Image (cartoon, coloured by chain):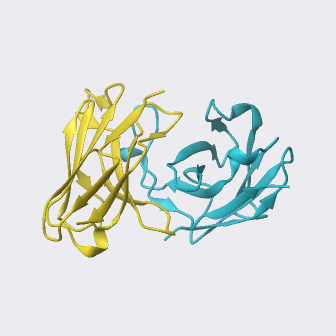
Amino acid sequence: QVQLQESGPGLVKPSETLSLTCTVSGGSISSYYWSWIRQPPGKGLEWIGYIYYSGSTNYNPSLKSRVTISVDTSKNQFSLKLSSVTAADTAVYYCASNTRGPEYSSPQGGDAFDIWGQGTMVTVSS
Amino acid sequence: DIVMTQSPDSLAVSLGERATINCKSSQSVLYSSNNKNFLAWYQQKPGQPPKLLIYWASTRESGVPDRFSGSGSGTDFTLTISSLQVEDVAVYYCQQYYSTPPYTFGQGTKLEIK
């Protein structure tokens, strides 16, 4: 059973870059799409973007100018960088994946998120 | 982007009674070639990540109790809990994965005990 664990600083200063890592255990990162999703306190879920193990990425247009997702297959990890953060970026950040296989996917390759990390709270404050 | 709108925002139901949550998408999420609706429901308890309950609008994920059911097609969907249990208190989200990226979620419905 694939498991995910987020790690990174819990406090980031305004205008700086938020950096988080998700470690994949119980399976290889060299399959599936790997996403970041965030949830501001008391609010709903926002998909940030995904990466395939080959390195191809896709980002939410609302965040695209500030987001970079990368993968390190040797460490079974993928990472999120969000630049020029403000208080509005304060949220619980989750890594998540769709591991069920292409037979469950939409015509555009989308699928439900069946695996989630526990989440890590990141506060943007000076 | 497909906008997902849930109703109500919050709901209080007595133990053992039925709970119904609605979700509407701004565009159809039905793929006519296989008659699948690419709509998922999640349950999120305090301090926990979301848990996948239902995919294809009406198929329960493995291990999900059968009191949870999903219905609907096209743009209008419903999550029903047939007999509310204490452990069902949570926030519920719908999500479309028909037109991605981006994946989009509803704003959530908070379910409480009356």
Horizontal relation, residue B41 to residue A54: left or right: left
B32 lies above or below B19: above
Picture coordinates of residue B25, whole percent (x, y): 34, 31
The residue under the point 14% across, 59% down is B18
Q: Residue furthest bottom?
A: B86
Q: Residue furthest front?
A: B114
Q: Position of residue A108 (x, y in %)?
A: 45, 32
Indicate the colour of chain A: cyan
**Residue A1 rendering spot, x and y as whole percentages:** 48, 71
Q: Which quadrant would residue A26 be assigned to in this image?
A: bottom right
Residue A124 appearing in the image: yes
Instruction: Report which colour depicts chain B.
Output: yellow
To which quarter of the image does residue A24 belong? Answer: bottom right
Relative depth, front residue between A115 and B96: B96
**Residue positioned 41% across, 42% down in the render:** B106
Q: Is residue B64 above or below residue B4?
A: below
Q: Inspect this view and state whether residue B63 appears.
A: no
The quarter of the image holding the C terminus of chain B is: bottom left
What is the total number of numbered labels drawn onto the structure image? 0
**B10 relative to A99 in the view: left or right:** left
Residue A60, image x, y percentages: 61, 35
Which residue is found at the position 30% from the left and 34% from the top? B24
- The residue lying at 65 percent from left, 49 percent from top is A53
| B24 or A58, nearer to the observer | B24
